[in-house]
Structures are given as structure tokens and as C-alpha cells.
Image (cartoon, coloured by chain):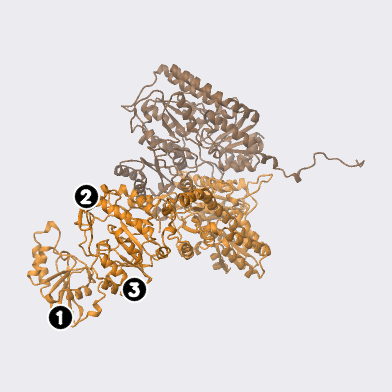
Amino acid sequence: MSFKDNILEKYSARVYKNRKNHIIVKDENVQEITANTRTIPGIMTNRGCCYAGCKGVVVGPLKDVAVITHGPIGCSFYTWGTRRNKAKGDNNTKNFLEYSFSTDLQETDIVFGGEKKLRQAIKEVVDIFNPVSIMICSTCPVGLIGDDIHAVASEAQNKYGISVIAFSCEGYKGVSQSGGHHIANNGIMKNIIGTSDRPLKKFSVNILGEYNIGGDGWEISRVLNRIGYDIVSIMTGDGSFEELQTAHKADLNLVQCHRSINYIAEMFKTKYGTNWIKVNFIGLDAIVQTLRDIAKYFNDEELTARTEAVIEEELFLVEEDVSYFRNKLKGKTAALYVGGSRAHHYQGLLKDIGIDTVLAGYEFAHRDDYEGREVLPYVKEDADSKNIEEIKVVPDEKNYRVMLTPEQYDELKKEIPLEDYAGMLKEMPNGSIIVDDLNHFETEEFIRILKPDIFFSGIKDKYVSQKAGVLSKQLHSYDYSGPYAGFRGAVNFARDITMGIYTPAWGYVKAPWNNKPVLTGTMGGDA
Amino acid sequence: MGKNIVNLTINPCKMCMPMGAVSAFYGINKCMTLIHGSQGCSTYIRRHMATHYNEPIDIASSSLTEEGTVYGGEKNLINGLKNLISLYSPTVIGISTTCLAETIGEDVPRIIDNFYEQNPDCNVKIINVSSAGYEGTQYEGFFKTLCAIVKNVEMDITPNNKVNIITPLISPSDTRYLKDVFEKFGIDYVLLPDISENLDGGYIKKYNKLPDGGTKIEDIAKMGGATLTIEFSKFTHDEISAAAYLQEKYGVPYIRLPLPVGIRDTDLLIQSLEKFTGIKAPKSINKQRERYLDAMIDSHKYNAQGRAVIFGEPDFIYSASRLCCENGIVPVIVATGTRCDTLTNALDDEIKKIAKNVFVDEYKILSNTDFDLIESEALRLGANIMIGSSDARRIEEKHGITLIRCAFPIHDQIGGQRVRTFGYDGSLDLLDRITNALLFKKDSSFRENLYNEFYKGDKYISTSKSKTFSQKAMERTVTHPCYNACGTENARMHLPIAPKCNISCNYCVRKFDCPNESRPGVTTKVLTPQDALEKYKVAKEKVPHLSVVGIAGPGDALANWENTKNTLSLIRAYDPDVTFCVSTNGLMLPMYADEMVSLGVTHVTVTCNAVNPSVGSKIYRYINYMGTKYEGETGAAILMANQLSGIKMLCERGAMCKVNIVMVKGINDFHIEEIVDTVKSLGVFMTNIMPMIPVAGSVFENMPLTNNKELTLLRNKCGQSLKQMYHCKQCRADAIGTLEGDQSIDFQDYQSDSNKEQIEKVRFAVISKSGILVDQHFGHATQVYIYDYENGEAKYIEKRSCKKYCEGQENCDDKFDKFEEIVKSMKDCKAVLCMRIGDIPSKKLAEQGIKVITTYDKIETAIAQSIKDYRRELI
């Protein structure tokens, strides 16, 4: 029986047929994975819903926006401060991340419609909080009862003179939170970017798909600022509405989480001519490579020199710590099951500290995140993806800029990931396992067979792993730690993992009275 | 009392039904739950439960997509069930429906039937609970699920010795306590649900993805034959109560007990069990009780400073509140996000009693509320500890109010599954945590407080209220409706004995007499001191709880000092217990403060609208001081100096001072915090920020009206430094009764009964909207009431209709025709009574020989009064 069959034998024929295409044992051939398809009911998936992707992931971290969840209370409660996207307000920027706003729909609202209540709720938010922008995220029943949240939004926008944006991100749309990312991307592009102005500045960048979990964005900004980049906006960790409005004035887009935000990057290119490159700020080798790539794009002698100087200094500061931890961790193995980009990003960091990745999987990624963007033309769209609107953008007359000549573009594309993402698969060694939409049952089976030293995932499978005797580390929330990005983050990460692996508790798992004697023998000469 | 805003929930204090459903199913043996809807619901709930319990939480989803919303979710649900069974082999599957499934109208029972039909060999028990998120909170979802479980199990009704135990969502640790107590009494029980192991598992060698604990279906089947059900809930409803169902269907009697938290409710459980079994409680339980009692006594002196916010599910907050009350901690806010109508009744007496003990004026019991309101009320009422889930952690962080985490969900600390509050020892644990939090706060601040108060002495007045105000003033405050917002049953009487005023405020005109003009400065009639005493005597008989006499104008009490002094002396001689309260603009305060205190005035309200002459000059037109008129900043400066020194004198003499501030937008609104800080430093007890009522004819008649929100915001802001009055009704100068019910109209003509006399018939035309009161403008009349006054009594004769004569400016030309018609309709009358009338019609009526009398009163009283006032002209 093959390795895969060993895992999947318990499934019914139908489920077996489905799941086997989501699992790959890496070999030297070009391999295809099935991803972004419907979840199998009843199988204990870790995936979330469309609302989670839109409200929870992309628009939620915008600190100065009051996001109203239009629906019954649960959805709003469950997204209240549960993701560790950190933000700091200041005198000019309000911070609403500590708040949860909901229309708390009741049965009568479901019967008679919730628009009136939504209208009033907007008024109350304006009266009490006076935000620069209000966003409305709808939940399952809202789509079904036919509330026209977009009409309510534009009416409120006219009435109060602030931006009011509606997102039809009902939970049932798409097959995972990925649909919600797309809907949020569309709304941000359509309604925010380009609505305000600022002067052009040298070496200006947007960071796309960085949500400042545990302060990652702050470490990244620190390094970029040191080199001399001007960060126009961060989408969306510690981000603000007002920053986003001027994002079109940046020279380059840096895409960290390809999955959740590549739509904006592409639309940007069409509308404003701004190029994007795929970056990775997680892991020392990765960030060094990324910083050099960015410098190459700007092709400025002084900037390049500063980049190298900063790299040298930052590496020097952390090297000793990292090598200490590497010694403690060398030869350990890890399994990664997280998100739509982290399962890839963290492999580099793990390698930096001597840990091999034996299994990696994404929750809600698409084929291109595994196999690279070159498969995009061949990805078959299913009904669920088609239901998510694709918006068309056209070049902006005033703000479209040509950044590179076609020759320069072609030349650069050979050297840096210009508008390209190679995916996770290529970098993984033969024999490692790639799984899409891993579920609890498979998690247990893989842990049993692979016996990794650490299992990286989220809160839902954290305790499955721990009960099975394998150290767990949450890569969604970092278990209240972080940052893990950048230079200093790498040290934090290495220290946290070492601390976990060397926790004394693991040594007491076996009760002393259950110990069998090491030697068995007999007394006298009976034998 | 609900939320302060109606359509927006800010920071919810509740979760949705499926959360409750899933939690209940977790207490069933070998049960898996499948949430029928989009997969987010399941993911979110797992995430929240896993964080709290630190256990793997496996909840499946039917993962409905857009296709499901169109064609129904049957396919997904059936596949989900199949997959769940093949991977987990459960004995029971609970299906909890979501908003999505309920909105598209899924017929889950039919789908389950279809599933069994397709899988005839399947012997998994499938239990469905309809749990749309918009139908209720997790609290109802939990009970509803227990009810669904009991309804879905075929009962073995052979009588047995078992006792059914039904609980709301309690911690695994508390569940273990319950089991232990019942075992100690040797009771054979069925516990529904039993989450003690499934949500608090130990570390075992082999991880078991379907835990072993929980109530078995075969045990649930015995519930129908049990001897008794004990349901631990004070607030569940019969229609979602498994206990009520078991009684109705199988005749199993039930009792409802509160959660065994605190000494009284644990006693109740132990006593009930003793009674049921006839066995004395074992010694170990008595020992626990002794220890808890000892702890209560040990910590009582620290607890008396506790002002608690208790929030969460109704049963939890009820129990935690009772624990606080029995330990002398005042629950100043008891709040639930669930709709719970019976909460106030259940707790009010208890909290009122403890609050009174420690001079806490106000507390709030809130149902269907959110954390936004809890936060603002907590600040206003000076809470220093919070008890509930971790959802108040933002309030803790922001305002430094310690949060004791002891209810689901706890997201930022570990050990949620092990929280113990049940029984004497659980109560002791909780009490110790509360007391220690209070002690920590005290320990970290008391040196500085002591140093400032006693060594430096400079903050003496402002930091120690109880020493500043005399014992008499403190006691009387409890029964004063204006100072004690809770004591609304206490009534006050304003005596209008002071007609003159010595300052002129731009917002004031004191010439109207009309109860529609309910505001300070308005009265119907000015009384002499003797009249005032008589009126008091009458009112005292008729109004229960009349405890306060106030002098509130209509002018200024001190500008009419002789009247004020005489009135107070007379009333004091008649009723030594009454509380005196005087309102003044403060101009003459330094002169009379001593005399006031010796007359027994314990409460003084001074209206200070500014503490800066340039602001003041915009509000006060002039003052009349010692016979000289001062205008502008000079006048304002004198007034302010006298107000502040007068207030200081009063406070030093132990009187309770309240400062009224009229908030005038654009004039003094920005300055009010400064006023509050200034008067606070003088020892003022509270301030009452009132919106200005723009009065026609006053200088400020066209000023913008302050809205309630601005007012509340400002009050909240000032409330951080000084107690604020939130319940001001801006009473008339002759108001009588409680703040809620002005009865002044009943007392206006208290003398008329004794003054009846025999005179000839006089006919009156009365302009009235209601037919009860003279309450309409002459020009608005569409009918005229005709009354005859005869033999000392007014008798109703008939109603005559007429056309409304004033239609406003546009139709002014043709009004004379209509006017003629009205005059015709009252030709046989000697006089017309109306609330108001224009000059021209008044003159015209006079030409016709009809006397015009304007008043606002009961018709009969108004007629009697007219006879008295104008007898020569009328008779």
C-alpha cells in the first residue's frame, strides 16, 4: 500500500477519490495538486468562510475604519479581537480595533428586512465615533433576505460625507475565506485607492498582504525605513484608510501574502502601471534576498549600498543568537499547515535554524500558490469561484505611470520575481508531502506516521497535536508571541521553538510507576 | 433599561445559539456535532471553545456553499453525516442549524429521515436542534439543545431511584463538584449534560479523538422514570426546559435551584439533598461551610469597598451577584446580553439592601445590553472590580478595573475549564480572588492617598466626602430624590415663595405660568410663608413619602430671604424631620450661609454657569447687588466670587452642595469641565449639567438646543472627576411629588374646599382640548365647553363647536368671520377661560362684555378661582 493510501484508506470511495488529488508526495516530475475546491462536508476542515476572509483578514485590520457586521450577533462576536493584527492609533488616526460593531439582527429583521436597522446603525456610528470610513460586511442571512447593503452604503455616503463601503461577503460564498479576500480586494480597489493625493517620493513602496500579526509589520517597516524606503501604505496590518487612499503614488508594490492580495497587485498594474514583486520577509535568507530584489528594482547605487550595509549590520546583530538556537534545533522536523502563504514562508526560516519541513499544506490556497503563477492559464474555474465578481479596471488617465521600458522589464524579470510567484512546491525537497485543506483526521494520521517534532498550525488543531504528544506552535496567532518576521523576528522565533521543544513537561509524560524495568532477569539458577 | 443606543451593538455581551447548542452536545457520550450552514460558523465556534478549554474541539460542518442556498443543503448534510460517521464512529450526532439553514428553510427532520432511509443499517442517534443565530443567544441555545436531546431519546419509563440533574453551561470543574456532592449523598443521578471530562481531559498516552466522557444515551433514557429533576437555573423558560418537558410528558416532578454559589445557595442545595435523602450532610461538607464562613468574616472589611460589575449569562450573574451581596460587595452593575425580564425582580431587593448599607446611591441591572453601555455605566458608578468572562478585558486595560475571569469564554488566560465557583469551597476560591484584587488595588495606592489626605492635608475636602458632609446631610441624602437617583419613591415639594430675583440671566423669562413650560423659574402662584405652611400640611397628608421641601423660586430664595426664612421656620416647627433644600443663584450666599445651616438647610443647589467673568458676562445680563446694578464682567465677577465663597462656607459647615450648570452651546459648553473641577475642589457633592431650554422672549430664545447625546457625553466626561446628576427633570418652582410624577396641579387650589359660598349662576365658556383642563389657546379652539357656576360649584352644561379661528399667518385675512362665529357661540357667557389669547381678540371680547381669563388648571378649579379673583366683575 502506498503512503497516501495508508492515510486515506478509511475514507469512502468518493471521499478517497476527492482527497487523493489534494495530497502530493513530492518527486522530480511536474506535479499537479487540486486546490480551492469545495470542502467535503463533515470532514472537520479548518477552513473559514467568506466573511472571515473579508472582514477578519483583509478589511478588519484597517484601524481607522469602523467595520459594521450586518447580521446576527455571532459573526461579529467571533471576529472581535480574535486575530492578533496589532495596530496603534495616534492623534491623527483613530483606532477601532478594540471594537466590534453589529446590527445584531433578530428574527423580525430576518422577516421584514434589516436595511432600516443598518441605516440607523450607520447613523449611530457616525454620531458616536465619527470615523473616516465605515465598512459594512454582510453575513449569511443578509444575502438571503435581500438587503441591498450597497444602496444603503451609497445613501449613507452622500448623507454623511464620509466613505461608506459595503462588502457582500456572505459566509456561503466561494469555498473558503479566499472568496472573501477577493471581495475585499475589489472593494478596496474600487472605492479607496486613488481617492486622495500626495506628492511622489523616491523609493516609495506599498506592502501588500502584511497583516501585522504579532507586530511583524513593524519589524518589516523598521528595516525598510532604515534602508530609506518610503512606505506609502501597508495592506492592511496597522493600515489606515487614509494611507490606502494615496497608495497609487507608490513606485512599487511588495507582495508578501500572495494569496490574499494578488488581486489588488494585478489591478494596480493595469490601472496605475505600478509593478509588483513577490517578497518574503520571513527568515534570514529570505529577507536578505528580498531586500536585494527590491534594491535591484530601483537600481540606485546609493540605495543598493545602503541595502548591503543594513543587511550586514542586522545579520551581525542576530547571528550569534540564531546560531546558538540552530545548534539546539538541528535535525528536528516540522509539519506546517497554515493559511495561503505562511506554510511556504516559514520553511525558509525553519531551514535557517536547522529544521527540515516534512509536510506543508495550505488551508485555502489556489493552485498557483502551490505550483506557481505559470499554471494560472490552466486553472479551471468552478462555479464557486465564478460567483466571486472579477472587476475590470482600466488605466487611470491622470495617474498611470510607465515605470520600466519593455526591455528593462524583461531584463529585470530574469533576475527578480517581478509579477511572479513561483509557488511552494518547487522549493520543497523530494519525498516531502504537500497537502491541501488538511483536516483533523488526516492531521492525526500524518502526525502518527511522520512523527514530526513540531506541528505548526492554528488553534483548532493545536490541541490535537499536543494530545498526540507533538509540540504545537500556532502560526496564525504565534501563541501570543512575535514578531517573527525580519531579522529580530527570526531570533524570537528560534527562541520560542527552542523553549517549546525543551519544555520540562514533555519529560514527565510517562508516570514513573508505569516504567518497566530496563533489565529483566531471573534470580538464581532457575533458567 | 436597555442600551443607550438602539440599532448598533458595540462590543457584544452575548454569543449566538449554535455556540450553546454545541456546548451542550459536548456533554453527551460519544457525540459529534455537525453545524448545518457555511463552514465559518463551525470554525469560529471551535476556535473560541478551543481557546477557553484548551482541548481539541471537533465540530463538523455541512460546508454549505452558494449552490446550497439555491438548491437546499440536503446533499451536503447527508454527505456530512456519512463522512462524520465513517471517520469518528460516534453513537450520537447533534445537528445544530445556523442562520443560513434556518433562513433558507431547511427541513432537517425530513433530511434525517431520508438519511436513515438511505442508510438502514445506521444506528447512530441523530438529534436536531433548530438554532438560528438571530433567534436567541448561546444561553437559550444550550437549554434548547438539552430539551431536544430529552425529546429525542426513547424513554424507559419504568420508575427508578434516579435524580435528574440539568445544568446551564457551567465549567467542567463545577460539573465535577456537582457529581461529587450527589455521590456524597449516595444519590443515583443522571447529569445532563456532563462536560466534566470531554472539555477538560487529562494527558493520556493515546489521544482519543472521540473522548469517553459525557452522559450516555442509555442513561438519558432513564430520565423519564426518575423520581425527581433538579434544574439548576432560575431563568430558563418552560418551553426550552428539559425539566418542564419531563414533568409534562412523564410526570417527573422537578425543582429549580439557583447555582450552588455563595453560602445561601449552597445551603439551599445541601438542605434540599438532606431533605430528599433523609441523610445528614457529611462532615466534610460542614467543614467546607465553616471554612467559607470564616473566610467571609476574615475578608469583610476589605470587601465593603467593592463595587462590582457582573456580566454574563443570567444564571451566572445572579449567583455571582448574590455571592457579592452576602460579602458586602455592591454589584453596581449586573448585566446580561440575553433578554431576561425577570432579572431585576430577582436581584433588586437584595442589591438595594446592600447598597443602602454602604451608602451607594445607584446601581443598574441591565438586560439585553452590550459592553459599550456596561463600560460607561461602570465608570459613572465607580466600579472597581469586574466579574465575568474575558470579554471585558478591554475595559480592564483601558480603565484599570480588575477583571476576575470566571465564566466562558476566557481568551487571554488559561484555566477556563478549571474555574471553580460551586459549593462552599468554590465560593471561597472566587471570594478570595475578588478580595485579593481589591486588596491589591488598595495596597498599591493607599500610601499616597494617606499622605495626601492626612499629611499634606490639601485635598481634605475633595477626597473624603464622608467627613465633609455632616452625618445629618448624609442621612437625608438617602431620602432626597434629587440627590439620590434611586430613591424615586421619595417625593419633594417645591414651595413658590420667592418671587423676586436679583440677577438677570439671558436664558430666563419668569412671566409665564403654564405647566407646558415646565422648567425652573416657572410657577402658577406665589405663596406667603403662612400659605406655604398650609400647602405643605395638605400635601404632606396626600403625598406619601414627602420628605423634602425645596425653595426654588420662582425668583431667588435668597433675594427673598425674609420669606424664605419664615417659611422654613414655620415648616420646621410643624415637621422636624423634613429635609430642607434651597436653590439659589448664590449672589447672597456668603451673607446667609450661616443662617441657612442653623435653620437646618442640609441641601443647597447653586446655579453656576461660569467661573470666568468673561464667559459669565455672556450669560448674566446684570446683577442687582446691595442696591446697585452691575453689568458685564463686573457683575459676573461679583456673582462668581460670592457663589464660590458661599459654596465653600456651606461645604465647610457640612451642607451637601449641588451645583447646577446650564449648558449653553457656544457660550459655556467648553468651559463646563473647568466649572466642575473648580466646584469639586470646594467640596461640592455633585454637579447637574442641564441643557438650556430656549424660552421665547429670552435673550437666548434663538440659541441652539443642546441634544441629549452632547449632554450625556459631557456628563460622562465630568463624571470622571465628580458625581453627576443624570436624572434631572428640570422641575417647576412649584413641583410636588416624585421626580416622575408631578402632582402640583392637584394642590393649586387647596383652599377652595373651605371657601365655598352661595352665589348666583354665572356662565363660563371654557377653551379646552381635553375637556378636563383649561389647556388650549383661544385661537386654536374648535369647540367651546360651557359651564355654569352655581351654589359654589361648576357644572358642565354643553359643548358647542366652532371653527378654529387661527390658522397661522397665511389665512389671516378671513379670520374675522370665524372670530365672529366664536363670539356668537359664547354670547351668553360672562367670561371665557383659556390658556392663552392674542391681544386683539382679547380686546374684542371685552367689547362684547365677555371677561377674558387666562389660566392653566382643572376646569372646575379654574372657574372657582375666577369667581374668587373677579367676583365683582362677574357677579
Question: Is residue B420 or residue B487 the one in the foreground?
Answer: B487
Instruction: Note whether A338 is above or below A400 in the view shown.
Output: below
Q: Which three-letter amino acid code belongs to the residue tagged 1?
A: Lys
Q: Secondary structure at mark 2?
A: helix
Query: Crowding near pointer 2: few (<14 within 10 Å), some, many (20+)?
Result: some
Q: Upstream in the sequence, badge 3 or badge 2?
A: 3
Question: Is residue B664 or residue B809 the one in the foreground?
Answer: B664
Q: Chain of mark 1?
A: B
Q: Chain of mark 3?
A: B
**Residue farthest to the right, as pictured:** A525
Q: Which three-letter amino acid code belongs to the residue tagged 3?
A: Ala
Do dots 3 and 2 share one subunit? yes
Q: Chain of mark 2?
A: B
Residue under circle 2? B632
Q: Which three-letter amino acid code belongs to the residue tagged 2?
A: Gly
Q: Left or right: B602 with respect to B352?
A: left
Residue under circle 1? B761
Q: Which chain is orange?
A: B
What shade does chain A have? Answer: brown
Question: Is residue B156 or residue B493 the one in the foreground?
Answer: B493
Instruction: Note whether B248 is above or below B135 in the view shown.
Output: below
Residue under circle 3? B573
Q: Secondary structure at mark 1?
A: loop
Q: Secondary structure at mark 3?
A: helix
Q: How far apart are the two marked residues, 3 and 2, measured between alpha carbons?
A: 42 Å
> Which image quadrant: the N terminus of chain A?
top right
> Which image quadrant: the C terminus of chain A?
top right
Q: Residue at x 31, y 74 (%)?
A: B537
Q: Is residue B804 visible?
A: yes
Q: Position of residue B476 (x, y in %)?
A: 40, 65
Q: How far apart are the two marked residues, 1 and 2, measured between alpha carbons?
A: 56 Å
